Amino acid sequence: MAISDVPETAGTTVTATIVGSESDLDLSSLRRRHSATSGFDSLNGKTNEEHDKDHSKQQHAIADNDTIHNDIADMDKQERVADVKFTYRPYVPVHRRIKESPLSSDNIFRQSHAGLFNLCIVVLVAVNSRLIIENLMKYGWLIKYGFWFSSKSLRDWPLFMCCLSLAIFPLAAFLVEKFAYQKCISEPVVVLLHIIITTTAFFYPVLVILRCDSAFVSGAILMLLTCIVWLKLVSYAHTNSDIRALIVSNEKGETFPNNFNVEYPYNVSFNSLAYFMAAPTLCYQPSYPRTPSVRKGWVFRQLIKLIIFTGVMGFIIEQYMNPIVQNSQHPLKGNILYASERVLKLSVPNVYVWLCMFYCFFHLWLNILAELLRFGDREFYKDWWNAKTVEEYWRMWNMPVHKWMVRHVYFPCIRNGLPKPAATLVAFLVSAVFHELCIAIPCHMFKLWAFIGIMFQVPLVLITNYLQNKFRNSMVGNMIFWFIFCIFGQPMCVLLYYHDLMNRKGELD
């Protein structure tokens, strides 16, 4: 049994001091012995008789050292016996200072919970292994090759061609900026042309998806790429407009802060635009921090991880989520208790799929892309899992979109006189519109569930901020965040969209 807080005694200090002096004595004597036998006599011209006298003195010193060493060993043994004799006697106090329990509220975050984390991993593995076996016994193997590829996928070739043709719009935006910096067209014309380009870049894929009877996954991928291209085009146009305004101010002699560097003269470069369109960022700037080289082995390992986790995500969707959703009822039309049971049952695989999606896209894919392009700023997310409020979550979980919103929506609203709450509401409104379009257009129906879900975050931001300020406890807001997003919000949206989609297909049939 290990015993801590053993009382220190004076003997221990004395012993340590003597041992230290003894070691110094031994070292010094060894140095003397070495020097006495290493050519010292020849240098000083000593006779053999003098050498014998020195050798006799050294022998006496060694004998004295052995005697001291034995005495110290005896004293050390006596001190250890004394320590055992007087340590933790009934008279000696055991409780000497105020201490908190490791799991008390004041001490819980000062402890290491590595053991409990390992326990959670073991329990998760055990529970999910049982669920896998139970699922296979009940439903059998549900994975179909059509999940990856089927002959029906050939119907989606218009979407693929539309995806390739999206490259036309950045080229058009580049030509507009080139003419603008050559002062061939006026500023209002530049703004009008950019509005036409960005609007066409968005609605052209939307019309293709709605006209084609494509699969949901194909339509969702095209809509995601369309939104990315649109956000990049807006940032490109907005940034270049701001650079031209700064150049005009600089020519007028206006001063800027020391940390505000204006590149002058500025030249529109097609290479910078091409790099921006491929880079894992939504905010345009003429140059980016770059890494010195590409780590090919690292990229290969990340690709292997991406393939594995994508397969795990597909397995969970096909083997777990599909049977649960297919055996459910519309959550707003059936029995409340039954709907609650379906939502709770769906919440566990939904959390796994969501975490796999986050890891695959925000960590693996964006880092692979950044490594191949030597893109230096790889803060694609922060520790959103520690978010104490809903507002913190939205600031940390998707950094590319957050930076775009702050740069091109929030602060422009502030500079134009809107108060901060109104600017925040505008940012959530833009986000809600894009969430709804990315889901509704591939489903070929508009039910506004995603829009309502995002706009519902606004009162949740106020509620969680109030709770955080009232209780001053990070765990309350964090638990509310996890419950809303993973236990209630996302499973409910999955069920709503699935049943509405099935009802639409039934009506068409």
Image: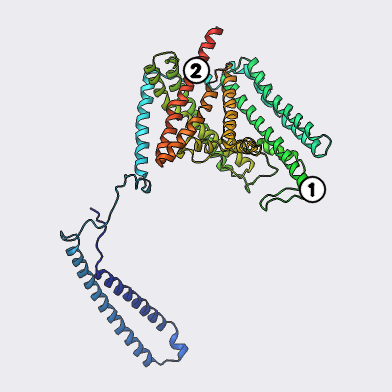
Q: CA distance from mark 2 to mark 1?
A: 58 Å
In the image, which disc is placed on residue 498? 2
Q: Is residue 251 above or below residue 203?
A: below
Task: Report the amino acid beneath label 1.
Answer: Glu
Residue 250, percent across and down? Answer: 76, 48
Horizontally, residue 426 falls left or right of residue 137, namely: right
Give left or right: position of 264 versus 128: right
- Total residue callouts: 2
Give the residue pinned by disc 1: 251
Residue 424 versus residue 87: which sits nearer the camera?
424
20 shown above or below 141:
below
Q: Is residue 422 visible?
A: yes
Find residue 444 and report its horizontal and vertical position in percent: 59, 16
Q: Quadrant of residue 433?
A: top right
Q: Nearer the viewer, residue 501 or 290?
A: 501
- Residue reaching furthest left? 90
In the foreground, 464 or 435: 464
> What's the residue type where badge 2 is placed?
Tyr
The answer to whether residue 315 is seen in the rendering is: no
Q: Which image quadrant is residue 154 in?
A: top right
Residue 208, quarter of the rendered image: top right
Q: Residue at x 36, y 22 (%)?
A: 134
Helix, strand or loop under label 2: helix
Counting from the top left corner in percent of width and height, residue 129 is at 37, 29
The numbered mark at residue 494 is: none
Reading the chain from its start, which is encountered first: label 2 or label 1?
A: 1
Q: Is residue 240 left or right of residue 509?
A: right
Front residue (pair 496, 336): 336
Residue at 53% in and 19% down: 146
Residue 281 is left or right of residue 463, and the answer is: right
